[in-house]
Image: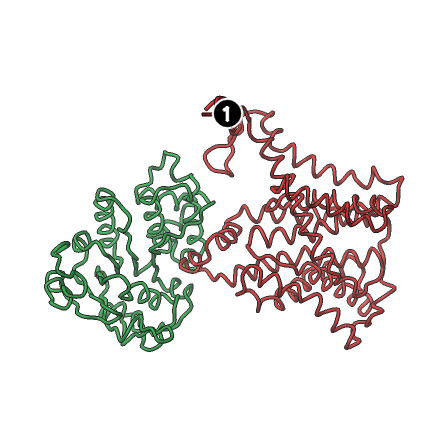
Amino acid sequence: MSGTGPILELRNVSMHFGGIRAVENVSFQVEPGEVVGIIGPNGSGKTTLINCITGFLKPTRGKVLFHGRDITGMPAHKVAQLGITRTFQIMRPYHSLPAYKNLVVPLCSPRARRTGGWRGGGRHGDRDTVALDILEELGFERDSRVPYQAAGTLPTGYLKRLELGRCLALNPEVLICDEVFSGLSASEIASLVPLIRRINEQGLTILMIEHRLRELFQVARRVVALSYGEKITEGPPEEVTAHPKVREAYLGSEEEGC
Amino acid sequence: MNAQPQRRKERIDRGIKARAETIYALSSLEELAYLLGPRLLFIVGFLALPLILAPWPYWHRVALSVCVLGLVSVSFDFLANQVGLVSLGGAFFFGVGGYTAALLNTAWGLPPVLAIGLATVVGAGICAVLIAPCLPLRGIYFAIVTLMYPLLMTRIIEAADILGGTEGFRGITGFSSVWTEAYGLILGLLVGVFGLRRYLAEDAGLVIRAVKENDQSVRASGISVAGVRFKALYLAGLLGCFAGAYYVHMYRSVGISAFALDLSILPIAATVIGGGGTLVGPVIGSLILVPLSEVLRDFGSLRIVVYSLVLAGFVVFRSEGILVFATRKYQQFERWVEV
């Protein structure tokens, strides 16, 4: 694959559920190393779009390209194998397993075994150590009980980080975050922002669905706005939020979040 | 207001568990003995069983039936409580294993050891491939469909008059001595139970448990959920087919009763009594159920009433099962504290 050209490209992607058009004719490109935000009011089709990209749904129409290769309708685990991973908006940990064992699962996947997991760490150490390394990087204090606690007993802030950890363990090229900031306190978000920036600096392309615009704009240089399943506009955060249709659809009359 | 002081039971883990559930810190021989004691008791107990029961051939046979039902029950427990597939296809595993061994022995003249070994490996493959199309089903739907498999097999064998029809196969080679018969089976049971427990403690087993907890996350981690379930199905099939194949060589005949529904239902009872998810529990459940059922033979039709009462009693009063209860008592101190 050449270094030029988009890493991820959506061409006229539509997803219909019966008569409901959850996503309609959405196209955009993501360049390697970029952080792109996807915004839109509730029900505008953001998560459905993610599901279409990651293979959890097969788009009704349109194409999803990864490095120019058609991955439309590929099963979810194959998409993850290629290096596109996603977090879930509603966290999906393995409740009864200790937190660090949650990361051992993706470390067992063929991709992690091939690439050595996050930054190739697994080529040398065993999986438990690599899992603890990743968790430490994500703010789980290594010498505390936290990484060894059953995931089901962890508070939301840690679970969000655990979701990120599960993705990073695969050593992905593209990380898709489905509202990682939601449900977190201001201070928790403040500590996540530099973390996401750091992950991006290590070469990951990041796609972020977000409602918390102020925090999103601290990391995303480009934003795609959706409303009723359609793309309204895309561009730098200032332009997008200034766009009259975005104001109308998403921000309403409020100026909050700009 | 309630005048009585409120009390609650406080439970404290014994000190040798360090951090995670599977990491222990042992500092003395007593602690080692404490940890290994129950396991050794179980293993030595089963190995001694044929010796103890040698004077009573009838009970000797019953002990072997315990092992056979134990294997099928472990297979059920593994699928239901570790993989999250409630399978009522125990009889299917058993029957496929039994018929495969019978065919290998009568048609190709393979000796029992080879016939049983091959029937276990090949039979489990057949079962896994045939049940694989049902893997996308969940919960009760998977249970219903797998229940149909053994029923379907008996009807096909009857109607098409294949595989010996209603007569089945006779004249299958038996074992050279009572001892090889008993110890082969007991060894198979011990290897099956502890092998499976070992496997579940490895990373591959971790993935299986993860699929049960959250299959979406496993898919997002680049692991094929269908692939993991198929592998688990094969492992469960190994236990069931081994039991069936062994049984056929013990009784030197096989018929459509190898697909009898008992073998799909009794494992549930054994698992409930013994303790689900433990893999050893279902064996203990079988150890109670099978002899109980023999003792109750004298009661005629009242037998099923007593049997049901025992089962109902367990469900109501000890639904966690004997082994889970015993493990908790063993690993934790309990005391009453005032609130």
Q: Which of A190 and B190 is in front in this view?
A: A190
Q: Position of residue A81 (x, y in %)?
A: 40, 63
**Which residue does the numbered mark 1 point to in the structure image?**
B7
| Side of A100 relative to B55 (left or right) | left
Q: Which colour scheme is used?
A: by chain
- Location of residue B96 by image quarter: bottom right
Q: Which of A111 and A236 is in front in this view?
A: A236
Q: Residues within 10 Å of mark 1 (few under 14, many from 20)?
A: few
Q: Which chain carries label 1?
A: B
| Side of A198 relative to B231 (left or right) | left
Q: Is residue A110 visible?
A: yes
Q: How many marks can you see?
A: 1
Identify whether B240 is placed above or below B35. below
- Location of residue B140 by image quarter: bottom right
Position of the N terminus of chain B, as image quadrant, is: top left
Residue at (68, 58) in percent of width and height: B90
- Location of residue B147 by image quarter: bottom right
Identify whether B332 is placed above or below B175. above
Q: Which residue lies furthest to the front in this view?
A: B1
Q: Where is residue A176 in the image (x, y as percent from the top left)?
A: 30, 59
Position of the C terminus of chain B, as image quadrant, is: top left
Identify whether B237 is placed above or below A66. above
Q: Nearer the viewer, residue A210 or A145?
A: A210
Check disc 1 and report its element: helix, strand or loop: strand
Q: Can residue A206 be seen in this view?
A: no
Q: Where is residue B287 in the image (x, y as percent from the top left)?
A: 74, 43
> Which hue belongs to chain A?
green
* Amino acid type, callout 1: Arg
What chain is colored red? Answer: B
